[in-house]
């Protein structure tokens, strides 16, 4: 019997777990699902005879290594910060590992150790990263098979509420890891446009956006995603004059989120002791520069951000609850942790609502062997979740990892 250990039962994992359990009988598998919340893990297993749920504390070395030891393969859907720790355990115990998280430099450093042990550490088996890279390479290979030369490559991804379910002021819903949403753009971004490298520090990522029309959906806005330049070499596009990987949002998201970043509400390093003693309004006050006490907080925030005190952005900040006198409720002691809790509280799919994922690749190619023909090749993938059922993000993130197992 093959024993598969799934670590993490969060929003991206349920479809994968369901798929593995359905396949378990015919393939002689047994699925163990571990999560900090055993209740959440049990919900995913749902009393299936080929599965079990356990309480899993990733910081407990004894439990961590014991569970890895029992497995033939580990599917790691814990947050990115724990990928390296689990990979180390898998290498030490000679177990294969699959994850949907990015391959960062620390994970790359484990490659030789994994090869010596004869095990596979397979990263980026999700939607973005994952399906996006595989579909992009499929297009690139088809162009090159025709003798084509790619001059421009643009790729966009998104996980959003479907248009018929985007019913809050920010037109967004938390259907995956809220921490990743809060920390998006923290490393800045860089890309290549018409031969010029563009570098954006964190505070400018959400200020330098552009319009994008998504087929079948409508007008969106795009912002650059991390380091696009490294994919030139990985995709074999060193001669391209444009290389952009971006994220799509409904119009208006970035103008509000950029001000949240400016306020310091995405800071994940500065801890506020006993943060639960303070209100959300208190936290915003702490983040403002020194001020005259006579002015209302809302007006001082608007002045600091140089925005209208009665405009849409201030309306959005107020709607999120940032000026509320309610006491803070969150897991953690940072401003970022507070934002995570607020996003989960305020940005959710309505009853019977559904989410949507989209991937778009745009390639400009020249075909010298076809009378110097020029082509713009566009691939658009849009998937919708099931109202009251599995989300599109859970399906598209979870299925690649499940198939790899």
Image (tube, rainbow, N blue to C red):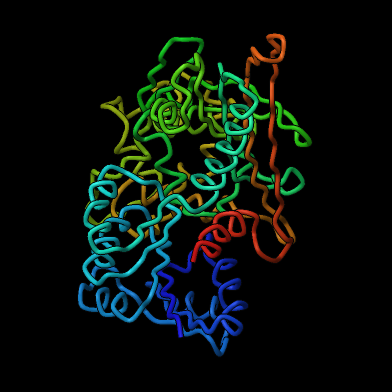
Q: Residue at x 51, y 61 (%)?
A: 404
Q: Is residue 297 visible?
A: no
Image-quadrant location for residue 115: bottom left
User: Residue 403 sits in which quadrant?
Assistant: bottom right
283 or 377: nearer the viewer? 377
Above or below, 302 relative to 7: above
Q: Residue at x 48, y 24 (%)?
A: 237
Outermost bottom residue: 49
Residue 377 is situated, as x and y percent measured from the top left of the image, at 69, 25
Query: Which residue is found at the position 42% from the left and 33% from the top?
Result: 234
Residue 177 higher or lower than 236, as above or below: below
**Farthest residue, direction front:** 369
247 vs 328, nearest the viewer = 247
Image coordinates of residue 142 in percent, x first then y, are: 63, 32
Q: Against 187, is 69 above or below?
A: below
Tally of marks:
0
Closer to the camera in the image, 245 or 138: 138
Q: Is residue 381 left or right of residue 150?
A: right
Relative image position of residue 259 (x, y in whole percent): 45, 29
């Amino acid at each position: 019997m093959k024993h598969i250990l799934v670590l993490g039962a969060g929003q991206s994992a349920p479809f994968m777990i369901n798929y593995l359990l359905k396949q378990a009988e015919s393939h002689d598998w047994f699925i163990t699902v571990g999560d900090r919340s055993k209740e959440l893990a049990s919900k995913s297993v749902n009393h299936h005879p080929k599965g079990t749920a356990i309480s899993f504390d990733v910081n407990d070395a004894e439990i961590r290594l014991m569970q890895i030891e029992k497995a033939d393969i580990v599917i790691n859907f814990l947050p990115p910060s724990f990928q390296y720790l689990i990979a180390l355990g898998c290498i030490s115990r000679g177990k294969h590992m699959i994850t949907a998280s990015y391959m960062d430099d620390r994970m790359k450093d484990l490659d030789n150790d994994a090869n010596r042990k004869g095990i596979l550490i397979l990263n980026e088996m999700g939607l973005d990263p994952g399906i996006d890279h595989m579909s992009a390479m499929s297009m690139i290979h088809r162009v090159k098979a025709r003798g084509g030369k790619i001059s421009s490559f643009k790729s966009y991804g998104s996980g959003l509420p479907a248009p018929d379910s985007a019913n809050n002021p920010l037109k967004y819903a938390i259907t995956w890891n809220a921490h990743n949403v809060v920390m998006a753009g923290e490393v800045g971004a860089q890309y290549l446009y018409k031969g010029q490298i563009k570098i954006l520090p964190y505070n400018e990522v959400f200020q330098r956006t552009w319009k994008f029309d998504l087929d079948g959906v409508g007008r969106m806005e795009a912002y650059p995603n991390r380091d696009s330049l490294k994919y030139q070499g990985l995709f074999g596009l060193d001669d391209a004059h444009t290389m952009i990987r971006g994220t799509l949002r409904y119009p208006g998201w970035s103008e509000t989120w950029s001000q949240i970043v400016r306020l310091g509400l995405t800071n994940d390093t500065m801890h506020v002791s006993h943060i639960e003693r303070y209100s959300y309004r208190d936290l915003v006050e702490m983040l403002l520069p020194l001020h005259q006490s006579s002015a209302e907080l809302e007006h001082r925030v608007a002045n600091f951000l140089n925005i209208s005190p009665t405009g849409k952005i201030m309306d959005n900040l107020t709607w999120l609850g940032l000026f509320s006198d309610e006491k803070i409720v969150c897991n953690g002691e940072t401003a970022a942790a507070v934002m995570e809790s607020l996003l989960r509280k305020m940005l959710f799919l309505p009853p019977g609502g559904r989410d949507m994922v989209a991937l778009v690749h745009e390639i400009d190619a020249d075909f010298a062997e076809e009378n110097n023909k020029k082509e713009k090749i566009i691939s658009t993938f849009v998937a919708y979740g099931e109202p009251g059922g599995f989300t599109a993000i859970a399906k598209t993130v979870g299925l690649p990892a499940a198939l790899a197992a």
